[in-house]
Image (cartoon, rainbow, N blue to C red):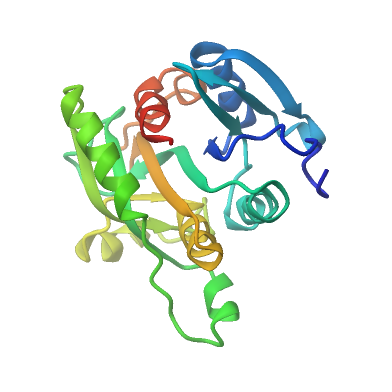
């Protein structure tokens, strides 16, 4: 066991899906995995290991934000030997043409977090997805007829922003969506030389004001999980 994960050695597969919401982890396990076993309930952060079309894979919640996700990613890699980490999360679109339910593959992730400035002595670091996973996810989506957008995104430490126009600068520089975790995932994957990808579903649009319900966020976005399970080794 690690500090925050109650799994025993061998209970977590080398490939894992990482939704922020632990209830989404349970939903993915119940809907997609055969013979799923719960390996973690510490702090309510549910984690499961099962089989997808004969392939052993795990899924576990990480909570919201870079600090929470970084704790679990560090422990999954260092203590449990996880080699492939695929975030399956929701995001807010920064472009009007992105609709609720659209899929986004994060090529890279900018951030307003100071976590990498602390790590790199005040310098900027540009974390990126693992190209092999990104390409495989793109090809899988196209083969299934699922339209996807690919590009840079923005990982924010702030969910509620006092400036209503906060998003406009990021959109002007090409960021497709905003979420709160990918920058840390890609940075840690680079540090430990493992594979990582964020597959995101648009749950709201800051340009148009569209928003998904809590139930839609938890249950109604299965396509990103299907893509992630297909590309997991």
Q: Residue at x 50, y 45 (%)?
A: 85
Q: Nearer the viewer, residue 111 or 170?
A: 111
| In the image: residue 204, left or right of residue 191 | left
Percent from the top left, x then y, of residue 24? Answer: 56, 25
**In the rendered image of this protein, does residue 27 appear above or below residue 66?**
above
Q: Residue at x 23, y 39 (%)?
A: 138
Q: Quadrant of residue 43?
A: top right
Q: Quadrant of the C terminus?
A: top left
**In the rendered image of this protein, does residue 30 appear above or below residue 192?**
above
| In the image: residue 141, left or right of residue 165 | left
Percent from the top left, x then y, of residue 223? Answer: 34, 23
Q: Quadrant of residue 206?
A: top left
Q: Residue at x 38, y 71 (%)?
A: 126
Q: Nearer the viewer, residue 227 or 166?
A: 227
Q: Nearer the viewer, residue 138 or 215?
A: 138
Percent from the top left, x then y, of residue 141? Answer: 23, 30
Percent from the top left, x then y, of residue 232? Answer: 43, 35
Q: Nearer the viewer, residue 159 or 227?
A: 227
Label total for image: 0
Q: Quadrant of the N terminus?
A: top right
Q: Residue at x 31, y 49 (%)?
A: 132
């Amino acid at each position: 066991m690690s500090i925050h994960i109650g799994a025993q050695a061998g209970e977590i597969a080398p490939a894992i899906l990482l939704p922020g919401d632990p209830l989404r982890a349970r939903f993915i396990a119940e809907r997609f995995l055969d013979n799923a076993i719960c390996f973690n309930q510490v702090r309510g952060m549910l984690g499961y290991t099962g089989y997808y079309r004969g392939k052993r894979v795990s899924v576990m919640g990480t909570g919201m934000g870079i600090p929470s996700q970084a704790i679990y990613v560090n422990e999954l890699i260092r203590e449990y030997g996880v080699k492939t980490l695929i975030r399956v999360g929701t995001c807010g679109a920064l472009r009007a043409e992105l609709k609720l339910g659209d899929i986004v593959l994060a090529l890279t992730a900018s951030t307003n977090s100071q976590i990498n400035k602390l790590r790199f002595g005040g310098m900027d670091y540009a974390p990126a997805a693992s190209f092999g996973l990104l390409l495989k996810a793109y090809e899988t989506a196209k083969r299934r007829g699922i339209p996807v957008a690919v590009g840079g995104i923005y990982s924010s430490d702030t969910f509620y922003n006092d400036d209503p126009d906060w998003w406009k600068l990021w959109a002007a520089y090409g960021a497709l969506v905003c979420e709160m975790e990918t920058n840390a995932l890609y940075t840690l994957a680079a540090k430990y030389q493992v594979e990582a990808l964020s597959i995101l579903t648009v749950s709201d649009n800051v340009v148009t004001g569209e928003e998904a319900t809590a139930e839609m966020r938890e249950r109604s976005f299965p396509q990103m999980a299907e893509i992630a399970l297909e590309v997991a080794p």
